[in-house]
Image: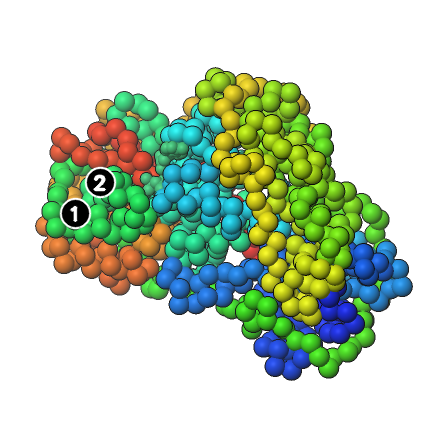
């Protein structure tokens, strides 16, 4: 409460609240403080509450025809609520809605509402707020390409996405195009053909494997360097969700699994800005080169990953079971591990105490990971806060005796023009190439609005924004090419805008959720039902609106279920957005591995080589090996380091189990694993030469050819959507 407020004002509640409750709002850089309401409203501020902006994804202005002079703004927040849920706290949607009615006319009130909405949107996106600025900047609407593997994890990706992700990102003013992959490598093919200018990010909805496909698909492009500038995101719906867990960890959120992890990552995505992501180029014996954002594994970790695939329906539990089985029948593998230490040192010893075999020059001591492991984990460790004292759904934050004046006088704020309608939903004819689906301007929502007593403000006719996902319609703008081989599973998605009652022509489905865009009805944000009453709690500004209850497909199957085959090799329509100047062509095949020499040659001077029997070798560059396994707590997505972990043969099962349990507790590599039996070495490059004739090697959890391989880090080569710093 001590932070200097950026905005402050007195407002009423949602339409149904009539002249009853009034609230005093203070917006700071980190919170929306809501004061007022009845005593005992459960809030920390005189019956109000505190909404952490870290839990807010968007804010929209709204209008109610029954109160023609008033304007409203709704704040969309997902504070963590349910503690004690296995997998971490779940988030619950809140959409407190406030009435601006100090000015005699709608325009004045709308200006105030929009000023608040813009300020909140800027803060949520981490954009600077100019001090004393009359007109606040409007964050640009983002367009994301969502690629969803319907078979990832336990096969819940689509339903989780529909229920938990799409509503949220729509409230965050993100338009999207969602495509279900139809087979392995489909995502890889798709991203080799997309028009980069049309997207602000590519987000995979599955496990780590789908993002691995996307990264390598981008690398397949002749313009790979520009393609890798495309911000990448991940929404965890797979069984291996290591990168998502790492993002969750670095964001300072409590450890989460399953739906909790997905909700966290969706909130973080809404607030996301691109930040650097290291990639490791991995060259295998055949000379093939792949790009990895997570890990290379050999031995125990790789065996468990691949062998447990048949237990996929168990979700992440498959790894625990697979590990238990492998511990009982522990294998060791003979091989040679060489690496270029990140910090060259003259005399070191292998943390396991084993003898290192010199290659070039006198053998430097293997850099144990002790340096990295000392001290407390760098992880956040602090569970996220509650974000204020909120009641459950329908809780009334406080009505009451505070009949304060509406201090947000119209004169205090500039009156903006009509142009400020956010949403930019693709309207009719906006099919050109972008294929924005998106969720928007739903007929039912528009229809709802009349009965709600609230009305969309501009162009909120159902057709203005609702988007149909067609099957194959060559007349519409086609955004995606796929593999330059049309007609075999390519996916076309159109941004056609159907009218109410429109029926997809060829069995394709229409996504007709609701686009909470400025000026839209509060019915999907905080009010619904008849008259002026909000849907659940006529007098609460918060309500617990259920806007997505009517996110239902109009086709006869679920939405996006059959995006149809029959793509086109070229986008039909030019992108509508500004096209940046083309960068010079990149050298073919990705960046040069300047730290490596061909696999057939001895490693360069300055490298360390260890030869012997290993239980596992793991080159990891994220903190997490799985959603529940912290293998390198100090690893950062852009630290420029390969955290090389290995366990030598001879380790007891008990000692190994202790290491794994320590990782599962999130302290992997610290007290429990500093030194033997697990060594962890910071490196820039490595080479692994298996001498055992058969085994499993994985890159980012995907099996690659068995044999010698080597890799080097390329710092910040890609970009990852991570939450904007406060
Ligand atoms: N429609 C599809 N049908 C079959 N396989 C697919 C499909 N889409 C993607 N794949 C493949 O499924 C594999 C696993 O995907 P992903 O890693 O995202 O999910 P996961 O459940 O975490 O799987 P895993 O645990 O095996 O990594 C990827 O290698 C990808 O190529």
If the image is split into quadrants, where does the N terminus sit?
A: bottom right
The residue singled out by tag 1 in the image is 326
- In-image side of 676 versus 122 (left or right): left
Q: Using the rendered view, name the quadrant where residue 117 is placed.
A: bottom right
- The residue at 71%/79% (across/down) is 400
If the image is split into quadrants, where does the C terminus sit?
A: bottom right
Question: Observer-nearest residue: 707 or 18?
Answer: 18
Q: Which mark is residue 280?
A: none
- Indicate yes or no: mark 2 CB to ligand 1 under 8 Å: no
Q: Position of residue 653 (x, y in %)?
A: 13, 55
Whichever of labels 1 and 2 marks the residue nearer the N terminus, that label is 2
Q: Are marks 1 and 2 in contact (CB under 8 Å)?
A: yes
Question: Observer-nearest residue: 399 or 264?
Answer: 399
Mark 1 secondary-structure assignment: helix
- Indicate yes or no: mark 1 CB to ligand 1 under 8 Å: no
Question: Observer-nearest residue: 400 or 199?
Answer: 400
How packed mark 2 is, by other alpha carbons closer than 10 Å (few <14, some 14-19, many 20 or more), is: some
- The residue at 38%/30% (across/down) is 184
The residue singled out by tag 2 in the image is 307
Q: Position of residue 153 (x, y in %)?
A: 36, 44
- The residue at 33%/24% (across/down) is 288
């Amino acid at each position: 409460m001590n932070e200097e407020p950026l905005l402050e004002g007195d407002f009423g509640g949602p339409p149904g609240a009539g002249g009853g409750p009034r609230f005093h709002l203070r917006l700071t850089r980190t919170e929306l403080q809501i004061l007022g309401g009845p005593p005992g409203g459960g809030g920390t501020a005189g019956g109000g509450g505190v909404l952490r902006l870290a839990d807010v994804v968007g804010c929209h202005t709204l209008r109610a025809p029954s109160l023609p002079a008033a304007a409203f703004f709704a704040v969309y927040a997902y504070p963590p609520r349910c503690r004690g849920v296995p997998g971490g706290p779940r988030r619950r949607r809140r959409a407190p809605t406030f009435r601006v009615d100090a000015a005699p006319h709608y325009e004045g009130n709308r200006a105030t509402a929009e000023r608040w909405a813009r300020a909140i949107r800027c803060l949520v996106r981490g954009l600077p707020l100019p001090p004393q600025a009359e007109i606040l900047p409007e964050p640009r609407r983002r367009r994301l390409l969502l690629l969803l593997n319907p078979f990832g994890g336990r096969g819940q990706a689509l339903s989780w996405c529909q229920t938990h992700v799409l509503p949220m990102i729509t409230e965050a003013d993100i338009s999207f195009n969602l495509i279900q992959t139809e087979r392995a490598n489909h995502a890889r093919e798709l991203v080799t053909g997309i028009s980069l200018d049309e997207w602000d990010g590519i987000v995979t909805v599955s496990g780590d494997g789908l993002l691995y496909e996307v990264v390598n698909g981008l690398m397949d492009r002749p313009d790979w360097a520009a393609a890798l500038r495309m911000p990448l995101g991940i929404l965890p719906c797979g069984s291996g969700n290591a990168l998502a867990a790492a993002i969750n960890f670095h964001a300072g959120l409590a450890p989460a699994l399953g739906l909790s992890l997905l909700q966290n990552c969706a909130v973080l995505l809404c607030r996301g800005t691109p930040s650097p992501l290291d990639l490791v180029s991995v060259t295998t014996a055949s000379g093939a080169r792949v790009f990895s954002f997570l890990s290379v594994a050999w031995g125990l970790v790789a065996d468990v990953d691949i062998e447990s695939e048949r237990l996929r329906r168990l979700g992440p539990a498959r790894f625990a079971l697979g590990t238990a089985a492998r511990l009982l029948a522990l294998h060791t593998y003979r091989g040679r591990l060489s690496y270029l230490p990140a910090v060259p040192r003259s005399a070191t010893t292998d943390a396991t105490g084993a003898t290192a075999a010199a290659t070039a020059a006198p053998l430097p001591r293997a850099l144990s990971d002790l340096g990295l492991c000392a001290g407390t984990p760098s992880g956040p460790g602090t569970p996220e806060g509650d974000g204020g004292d909120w009641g459950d759904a329908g809780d009334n934050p406080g009505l009451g005796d505070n009949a304060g004046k509406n201090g947000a006088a119209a004169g205090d704020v500039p009156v903006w023009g009509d142009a400020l309608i956010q949403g930019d939903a693709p309207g009719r004819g906006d099919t050109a190439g972008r294929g924005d689906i998106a969720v928007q301007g739903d007929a039912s929502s528009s229809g709802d609005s009349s009965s709600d007593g609230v009305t969309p403000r501009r162009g909120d006719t159902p057709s203005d924004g609702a988007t149909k996902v067609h099957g194959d319609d060559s007349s519409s703008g086609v955004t995606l090419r796929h593999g330059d081989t049309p007609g075999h599973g390519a996916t076309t998605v159109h941004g056609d805008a159907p009218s109410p009652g429109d029926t997809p022509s060829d069995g394709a489905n229409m996504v007709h959720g609701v686009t909470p865009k400025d000026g839209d009805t509060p019915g999907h944000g905080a009010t619904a039902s008849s008259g002026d009453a909000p849907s659940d709690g006529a007098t609460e500004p918060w309500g617990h609106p259920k806007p997505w209850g009517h996110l239902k497909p109009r086709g006869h199957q679920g939405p996006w279920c059959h995006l149809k085959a029959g793509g086109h090799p070229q986008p039909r329509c030019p992108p509508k957005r500004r096209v940046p100047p083309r960068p010079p062509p990149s050298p073919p095949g990705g960046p040069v591995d300047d730290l490596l020499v061909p696999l057939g040659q001895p490693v360069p001077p300055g490298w360390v080589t260890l030869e012997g029997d290993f239980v596992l070798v793991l080159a990891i560059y994220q903190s997490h090996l799985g959603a529940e396994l912290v293998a390198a707590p100090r690893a950062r997505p852009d630290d420029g380091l390969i955290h090389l972990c290995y366990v030598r043969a001879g380790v007891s099962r008990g000692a190994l189990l202790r290491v794994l349990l320590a990782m599962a507790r999130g302290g992997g590599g610290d007290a429990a694993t500093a030194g033997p039996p697990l060594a962890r070495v910071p490196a820039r490059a490595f080479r692994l030469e298996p001498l055992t004739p058969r085994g499993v090697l994985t890159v980012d959890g995907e099996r690659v050819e068995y044999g010698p391989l080597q890799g080097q880090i390329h710092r910040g080569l890609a970009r990852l959507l991570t939450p904007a710093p406060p």
